[in-house]
Amino acid sequence: MQNDKPLATYGLIGVNVLFYLLSANLLPSGNVLEQTFPLFFPENPAFKPWQFITSMFMHGSTTHLFMNMFGLFSFGVLLERIWGAKRFLIFYFTVGIGAGLIYTGISYFDYQSVVNTLNLQPEELKQVLSIQDPNQFFLVLERFSPSAYGELGEDKLVGFFYAYHVRLVGASGAIYGILTAFGVLFPNAKLSLIFLPIPIAAKYFIPGILLLDLFSGVTGFSIFGGNIAHFAHIGGAIIGFLLMLLWKHNLGPRPVRS
């Protein structure tokens, strides 16, 4: 008889909760996790390639953790039962890593465009980026490049600062990939937001959410609050959709065995 217990989904939720408790300074390892497991910018000395995986298990707040785990439970259980644990885990980690790569790639493009404009010497750039406080960052930058503010503007320079210093955490990219997979398999299923319980078909709901993320990522204005990696969401959805196209011939529901 087929085992339909979604053990992989439950396991992922359990590991995410465990990592959150460990990183919340409830145990001595908390600081170590916070310094090594988030995804740092590639130019940052703290960056390690394996952070594309470990960052998926780190979360910035209880709300952040709850929302991602709610999404993982809501859609992951069904997809795991359709695909099986192995294929589900391959999908989950592929879309999560892909989301991190796309987010990092876009951040790196923006970062490099500012570096090219500043035209600082390597040691000068290193000294500017070593500043942790954004206000001090502007003062030091003005010393090395007085025309930077006028040429690039505040928004561009703030984005440059945070691209280097901010750490990416969370499973949101993977969750968006799972949500996209659900929408491909069940386009007419009704979905709604927790704070806006209006049922909308998945084929309209998911593109609508992605358009909001794209708008927020481009403009910097977010109706869901700040400190959200919108391009990681979009990246996860893109990788998820591409995987669904690649696997389209054998991703449908499996026959039930008695």
Image (spheres, rainbow, N blue to C red):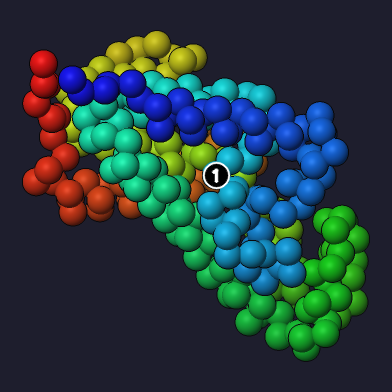
Image coords of residue 233 (percent x, y): 45, 44
Pointer 1 residue: 56
For the question of whether residue 112 can be seen, the reply is: yes
Q: Assign a secondary structure to mark 1.
A: helix
Q: Nearer the viewer, residue 28 or 124?
A: 28
Pick the front one: 163 or 158: 163
Q: Residue at x 22, y 30 (%)?
A: 82
Q: Reply above or below: 7 against 195.
A: below
Residue at the far front: name it.
1
Q: Is residue 71 left or right of residue 114?
A: left
> In the picture, which quadrant includes the C terminus?
top left
* Residue at left offset 83%, top offset 72%: 128
Q: Residue 226, located in which quarter of the rendered image? A: top right
Which residue occupies 58% across, 65% down? 49
Position in image of residue 163 (x %, y %): 66, 60
Where the N terminus falls, by quadrant? Answer: top left
Q: Position of residue 231 (x, y in %)?
A: 48, 50
| Kind of residue sitting beneath label 1 | Met
Q: Residue at x 73, y 58 (%)?
A: 165
Q: Residues within 10 Å of mark 1 (few under 14, many from 20)?
A: many
Where residue 102 appears, as percent x and y from the top left, is 45, 59
Is residue 220 visible to the viewer in this orientation of the structure? Answer: no
Question: From the viewer's perspective, is residue 16 above or below residue 45?
Answer: above
As drawn, which residue projects farthest toward the bottom? 121
State whether residue 221 is above or below residue 122. above
Q: What is the tally of numbered marks visible in this picture?
A: 1
